[in-house]
Image: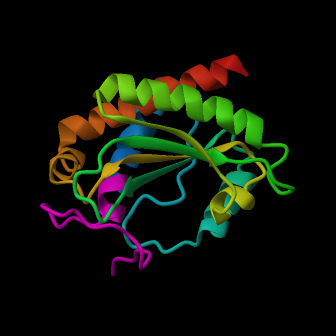
Amino acid sequence: MRCAPLSSATGIVTGLPEYEVVLQISMNLKEALERRGVKVVMTRTTNDVNLSNSERARIANRAKADLFVRVHGDGSPDSSTAGITTLYPGKTKWTAATSEPSRRAAQLVHRAVVAQTGAADRGVVARTDLSGFNYAVVPSILIECGFLSNPVEDKLLSSPHYQDKLAEGMAKGIVRYLESR
C-alpha cells in the first residue's frame, strides 16, 4: 500500500508521485549527512507511511532535532514555472522561538542547493500557515526541490544524478547551519 496526501503533486512527464521522488532525495540526503557525521532521524524510509504534518513535527520534537528538514516537490497550473523555493516558519505565537534560527538555516540551505544544482532561485519565504512549522518546537525548513508540473524539472527530479545534486546541496547547507550555531 502506498499512502500520500491528496494534494501530492505528480510528475507531468514521468507520472511519478511526489512522495516517491522526495523519499529518494531524502534517503540520498540522509546518506550525505551521515557521511559528514550528522545523526539523522527520518519520519519515513518507505512509501507505505501516512503521517500528518503535526505527527512529523512531533517526531522532530521528540528527537530534539537541531533542524527539522522537510523535502517536497512543487506543482503549479503554469507548466513553465520552475525553480527551488525554501520555506521557513514566519514569526507567530507558536514559532517565536524557532523563526529566526529557521530563517538562517533556510538561507544557508537554499543558497547551497541553488549553487549545487544551478536551478532557478525562487527565494526563501516565511510561512505562517503550515502545520508542520506551527507544531515544531525545533528550527524547521521546507525545501521545494522543483516543479513536478514543469516537464524539464519533472525529468530532473526523477534523475538519480540530479537527486544526488539536490541532496549534496542540502547537506552542505545543513552542515553550514549546524556549524554556525
- Magenta segment range? 1-22
Give x and y (percent) for residue 55.
65, 68
Q: How many marks?
A: 0
Residue under the point 30% across and 53% down = 147
Question: Position of 40 compared to 164: left or right?
Answer: right
User: Which of the 4 image quadrants contains residue 58?
Assistant: bottom right
Residue at x 46%, y 72% (from the top left corner): 49
Screen quadrant of the N terminus: bottom left
In the rendered image, residue 77, in percent from the top left (x then y), is placed at 30, 66
Residue 38 in view (yes/no): no
Q: Residue 15 at what x, y percent from top left?
A: 17, 67
Q: Is residue 44 above or below residue 140?
A: below
Membership of 27 in magenta stretch: no
For the residue pair 116 and 93, the one nearer the viewer reads as 93
Residue 11 location (% of width, % of height): 22, 62
72 sits left or right of 163 in the view? right
Is residue 78 placed above or below 176 in the rendered structure?
A: below
Residue 11 falls within the magenta-colored stretch: yes
**Residue closest to the far left:** 13
Name the quadrant of the C terminus: top right
Instruction: State the residue at coordinates (20%, 50%).
Output: 158
Magenta segment, prevailing SS (helix, strand or loop): loop
- Which quadrant of the view contains residue 12? bottom left
Decide if residue 179 is in sight here. yes
Q: Residue at x 47, y 25 (%)?
A: 111
The correct choice, above or below, for 43 with respect to 144 in the image is below
Q: How is the image coloured?
A: rainbow
Q: Is residue 67 left or right of 80 when viewed as pictured?
A: right
